[in-house]
Image (cartoon, grey):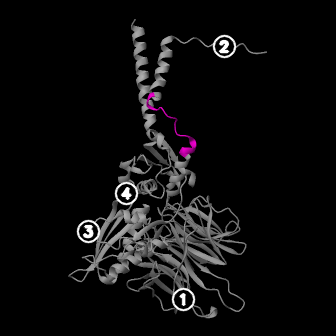
Amino acid sequence: MAGNASRWLCLLAAVLVAGLTAATARAELRIDITKGVSEPIPLAVTDMVGPNGEPSDYGADISRVIAADLERSGLFKPIDNKAFIQKAGDIKTLPRFGDWRVINAQALVQGRAHLVTDGRLRVEFRLWDVFAEQQMVGLAYYTIPDNWRRVAHIIADAIYKRLTGESGYFDTRIVYISESGPPNRRVKRLAIMDQDGANHRFLTDGSALVLTPRFSPTLQEITYLSYYGNLPRVYIFNIDTGRQEILGDFPGMTFSPRFSPDGKKVIMSMAKDGNSEIYVMDLQTRIAKQLTRHSGIDTSPSYSPDSQRVVFNSDRGGSQQLYVMDADGRGVRRISYNKGRYATPVWSPRGDLIAFTKILKGTFYIGVMRPDGSGERLLAKDFLVEAPTWSPNGRVLMFFRQGRTTADGKGGKSRLWTIDLTGHNEREIITPVDASDPAWSPLIP
Amino acid sequence: MKQPEEKPKPKPAFEQTIAEALKRPEKRHNPQQPLSDSEINAVRRQIQRCWNLPAGAKDAENLVIEVAVKLNRDGTVREARVVDAQRMHTDPFFRTAAEAARRAVLNPRCNPLKLPPEKYQLWQQMTLNFNPSEMF
């Protein structure tokens, strides 16, 4: 009897569970979405207005710079203002989301910009998710009016970060080598500008040749190679003070310098007796340590963002290839194995990739590979493309491109370009004259 | 030569009753045909056109997003809710991916969903599982 009863209980439980499962299964229609598209997100950036909703000159300029930053990233497509149904609109009232949905704006940027009584510029913005009808971020800034472009870049970074999940790179600067004059008397000057080409100025007068500038992660300083007095040496230059200082007293020529991720060391090459090795110098103690010891040419070192490893360029295996070693110089291993020669490796700030220049059958390429050498992808190619530098978020590379010079001496212009990791969004950065060797700053603190 | 077929053991009467009882609730609550593969594929194609993944995002292939969707009878979306709401607050990469998935569902260019009105009972609620791993 007892056995029978428990059997019935079990069966009853089974029926109940089965009933529940059936009910859940009915409600739980599940559809897997496994493919999507990769398109710029359409968004509307309205002209920022004054405190009472009136037009604002600063506001219109700031909105224009924000929209241009976002557009150049290739991830966003600002919608032409002429298509707007609701014009600027003040941030005090909720946007008419329906009006923005109609023109397919998925995100909306509104704001205010006006001078306050103490003469400062106050800028406030809101970013809206048009479909979800929710505010995604809203911030306000005070600054001196001359700084309006920086505020625009900072806001563009905030929008980029909120919509992509990653830090932006718009509030940054570029140093590069500005080149002018005939090929046999080329004047090379160090120049600096905002990442969008604005606020351009020269840092050196061109009397001494300068090459390979690199930004310090602490921003105010650049390290580079200068042939001051015809002796190639690594220098450090303070952007704010204009002070230039030779780095270390090495017996041979020093070149291809680069800061460590904490900005406290500079890693570089030193050539002596026809051989070049990699050294690292502590900027406080000024003590240099030799990292490589090989009869091959070792050069172009670049730290991983965690400072644990260094990627560099060496011909020790017979041709120019990329190698990775531990930060103390041990454990050297080759990572590039495909056809061609490899040069100027740079570790991405987010650590996942190494960018390089590749030379194959007379053509130059800018490419990336994983730190173990796998997954090589070539992003740009030309007669000459060289010297990649990463945006601080590791999504975009800047490099210089030089066209072929024709028989009559025309062409051969050298210009700065950016390309994102997809390889599809290639843009020129406008410079006053020829440009080479760009270096991207970190986000301005 | 045919192998002699093994005779199925006769089931006790109460087991048969239970087996029928197990089938019954579904029959009672779900009198219509289930959604066909082509109907499900049509929804998939509609949503995929509006699912925009930010290019070059780090580790994007590992972010699987579930969106619980409530639909009106005309196929328009009444509600789209990211199931793991907690993670929206703690993981900015997840939040970005989740918001992109939600935009795909809410985008008026990709709904109303083309589903048979007579089967509304079956699709008035659904979970869309956005899994980008095949895209990388």
Report if the CB atoms under discs 3 and 2 are less than 8 Å apart.
Answer: no
Q: Chain of mark 1?
A: A
- Mark 2 crowd level (few <14, some 14–19, many ≥20, 10 Å Cα): few
User: In 3D space, how far apart are the residues under numbered discs 2 and 4 (Cα atoms)?
Assistant: 62 Å
**Mark 2, secondary structure of its residue:** loop
**Taking B118 as reference, is A336 left or right?**
right
> Dot 4: few (<14), some (14–19), or many (≥20) neighbours within 10 Å?
some
Q: Which kind of residue does numbered mark 1 sit on?
A: Val
Q: Earlier in the sequence, mark 4 or mark 1?
A: 4
Quadrant the N terminus of chain B occupies: top right
Q: Nearer the viewer, mark 4 or mark 1?
A: 4
Callout 4 amino acid: Ala
Which residue bears the numbered disc 2? B6
Q: Amino acid at mark 3?
A: Lys
In magenta stretch: residue A218: no
Residue most extreme to the left: A117
Which element carries disc 4, helix, strand or loop? loop
Q: Is residue A1 left or right of residue A362?
A: left
| Range of magenta residues | B28-40
Q: Which residue is mark 4?
A: A132
Numbered disc 4: what chain?
A
- Between A226 and A93, the one lying in front of the other is A93
Nearest to N terminus: mark 1 or mark 3: 3
> Which of these two is toward me, A208 or B26?
B26
Q: Which residue is mark 1?
A: A433
Residue A9, percent from left and from top: 39, 16
- Residue A66, quarter of picture: bottom left
Which residue appears farthest toward the top when viewing the image? Answer: A1
Give the numbered dot on residue A92: 3
Q: x%, y% of residue A365?
A: 64, 71
The alpha-carbon separation of the residues under discs 1 and 3 comes to 46 Å
